[in-house]
Image (spheres, rainbow, N blue to C red):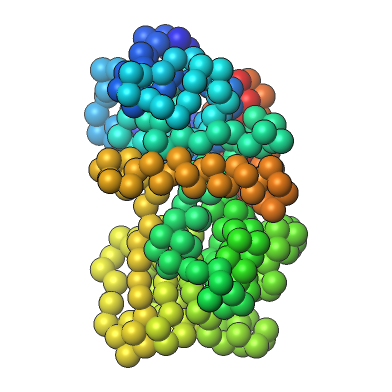
Amino acid sequence: MKAIGFKQSLPITAEQSFIEFEAEKPTATGYDILVKIAAISVNPVDFKIRQNAAKDITLDTPKIIGWDAVGTVEAVGEKTSRFKVGDEVYYAGDLTRSGSNAEYQVVDERIVGFKPKHLTIAEAAAIPLTGLTAWESLFDRIKINPETDKGKTILILAGAGGVGSIAIQIAKKVAGLTVIATASRPESADWCTALGADFVVNHYDLQAELAKIGHQEVDYVLDFVDLGAYWETAVEVTKPQGHIVSITGSSKPLNLNLLKNKSISFSLEFMYTRSMFTTEDIARQHEILNEISRLLDDGTLKTTLTTTLKSFTVEQLKKAHQMQESGKTIGKTVIEF
């Protein structure tokens, strides 16, 4: 099968930053299904791993990365029960296994969902990784109850990014929260508003901006950009007994003592935890993806796709990575095979 990978961690502009090569088509065994891939999307995790996985070495075999994918089931392992040959599926994959930048991929069926029927393959490919991350942040980490927590306030840092774009929708349409998103450019602010944010504030002077809209404090904070840069501010604007969730972590130690007087809860969210450790509830991701699929099909949620690149080539993959590395993309970028 055709695959695109890398042997060295190089700047994306370098000729060998991605190389096309022939790889053996994988075989589905156990809980795995074999998927013929039709579209993929590119996330910040893609370029971060490309930049660091082979920093001071040259790999013998090119590393295949990529996680978001949409495709058709071609074969199933002997332990599978959720899918059959011909099913259209979407998923965010497993960080510890070969990725979706290839014509075929094997993936554990317990972290795979049925593709939304009413979405194109490109529209669907934009969703899995960010959808799972946002859903787990809200319902597994904060444990929001739409019945009892309706109307509470949530601040989403980096509202126009991939995760922020779907988190705004889930927080508003599913959890019933009052959503405040951060954005610094007019186009990203407009995007957040269109997705359902009640307020959009500029992250450069966050406390003053929140005061301006009458929400000096919020119940929840979701960090999708840079926890280290926002830590003290996030603590200050979170209400007593509130909750902060971050997907970014921090390169430097955080002063957790700042949380004490307000009894603020703090969680880190890593969407790959369930697949990486084969947790007892690994199949929860299958359930979440199917629920998101249902919400996309009935119009409650909408795709966050903004850019579609045609054809699975080194050039298009490089272009997608360059866009992600710029830090200025709105929504999601997808490559259709």
User: From what the image shows, is residue 247 above or below residue 271?
Assistant: below
Q: Which quarter of the figure has residue 311?
A: top right
Nearest to the observer: residue 212 or residue 215: 215
Q: Residue at x 58, y 65 (%)?
A: 175
Q: Is residue 82 above or below residue 145?
A: above
* Rendering coords of residue 135 (x, y %): 50, 55
Question: Is any part of residue 235 visible from this angle?
Answer: yes
Q: Give the quarter of the figure containing the C terminus.
A: top right
- The residue at 39%/36% (across/down) is 110
**Rendering coords of residue 10 (x, y %):** 39, 32
Give the side of residue 2 with respect to residue 249, left or right.
right
Name which quarter of the figure residue 158 lies in: bottom right
Whole-percent x, y for residue 259 in the image? 33, 82
Say which residue appears at 46% left-offset and 34% top-offset.
112
For the point 61% across and 55% down, the residue is: 165
Instruction: Choose between 183 and 337: the one closer to the eye.
Output: 337
Does residue 325 lie above or below 244 as drawn? above
